[in-house]
Amino acid sequence: MAKFFKHVGEHNGKKVIIVQRALPGEDHLAAVIYSQIIPSKYHDDIMAILQSDEGQQSNEFMDIMNRRLLSNGQNMLVTMVNEGYVKKAQANQVIVKPNASSAIRLDELTKLLREAGQGAEAIRRLEELDRQQGRKDPIKQNAPMPSSAQALDDGSLAASYMTQATKMRSEAKGLLAEADRLETEAKQLDPSLDASKASKRGKTAKAAA
């Protein structure tokens, strides 16, 4: 029997980690992470959990993400959401590839799991569906995907940008403060640096005059 590998798929040709198959009150939308754009400092942690027995046994990947920490000690799910890596995607545009020979739309898989559960029966149903389709390209078989599909609505995207902007400002302030501290220590270690800087300022002022 083919291995049923959970929580992975593709959206618009890009590999995704499926965080939540269907959003509450918005069954047509899923929450995904584009695995190729996750910073390396997070990528290895997330993939290790995804491929673990614990990750594969979880009903929704978000359940295990919410219980695990990244290497920096931060909550995995909270960090991914706050830093804007969790995106919304149309479930019927996400192609799930649970093993090397099978492919199914996420909305169809969600329906199958609700009807058949998540054990051997679900795998049997998936394999049966795969045989019926003749292993053809599921994207060609189903309705075409809009070329301008948005992974996030404008409001969510704006909120994500604001969060990132706030974080960047905070980091910038921290870097400036550290630069001032290092400059002060350098002048204390070598007072001639301060005199040299003052001399340069005087020459510049004379040249401008």
Image (tube, rainbow, N blue to C red):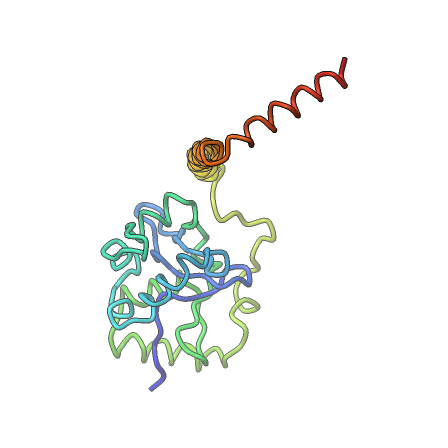
State whether residue 179 appears in this view: yes
Residue 174 image-quadrant placement: top left
The percent position of residue 76, horizontal first and vertical second, equals 31, 53
User: Where's the C terminus, which quadrant?
Assistant: top right
Taking the view exactly as shown, the residue that stands out farthest to the bottom is 1
Residue under the point 50% across and 35% down: 190
Closer to us: 199 or 136: 199
Residue 38: percent from the left, percent from the top?
A: 46, 56
Up-down relation of residue 158 to residue 92 (above or below) = above
Residue 109 coordinates in the image, percent (x, y): 37, 66
- Quadrant (top left, top right, bottom left, bottom right) of the N terminus: bottom left
Left/right placement of residue 110 relative to residue 89 reads: left
Q: Position of residue 188 (x, y in %)?
A: 45, 32
Q: From what the image shows, is residue 20 above or below residue 182? A: below
In which quarter of the view is residue 118 placed? bottom left
Residue found 34% across the figure and 54% down from its top: 22
Give the residue drawn at x 54%, y 69%: 141
Left or right, 72 with reference to 94: left
* Front residue (pair 62, 205): 205
Taking depth in this image into account, of 38 and 191 the one nearest to the observer is 191
Q: Quadrant of residue 198?
A: top right
Specify whether 3 is left or right of 101. Answer: left
